Image (tube, helix red, strand yellow):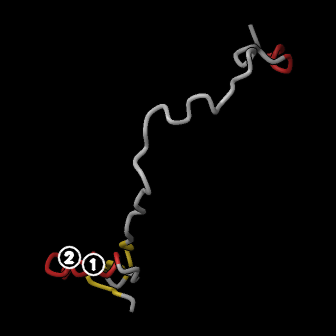
Amino acid sequence: MIYQIKQSELPKKLWSLIDAALRGEPVFIERDDKALVQLIPLKQMLHPRKAGSAKGMVKMADDFDALLDDFAAYMP
């Protein structure tokens, strides 16, 4: 079922619309018979991110900051 609701009806039906969106049902909020917003649930992360969890997985070249010969003409 697709839910289409006028902006003026939103305050009294908000939580039922949120529940519908969480069930995967399309929810659109309209003004002047034009859809303005689609209500979609946020994706839940499987596990929280942890700072430093990718440490040692990325290798930067020793000359990463070195100037490229191709740009020599543009350098002062």
Q: Residue at x 28, y 84 (%)?
A: 5
Q: Nearer the viewer, residue 59 or 74?
A: 59
Quadrant of res 35: bottom left
Q: Is residue 69 left or right of residue 62?
A: right
> Mark 1 is on which residue type?
Asp
Q: Is residue 50 left or right of residue 21?
A: right
Q: Nearer the viewer, residue 65 or 69?
A: 65
Q: Residue at x 39, y 73 (%)?
A: 38
Q: Position of residue 10 (x, y in %)?
A: 20, 78
Neighbor class of circle 1 (other Cα within 10 Å; few <14, some 14-19, many 20+) is: few
Residue designated by label 2: 15
> Mark 2 is on which residue type?
Trp
Quadrant of res 63: top right
Residue designated by label 1: 19
Q: Secondary structure at mark 1?
A: helix
Q: Residue at x 39, y 83 (%)?
A: 25
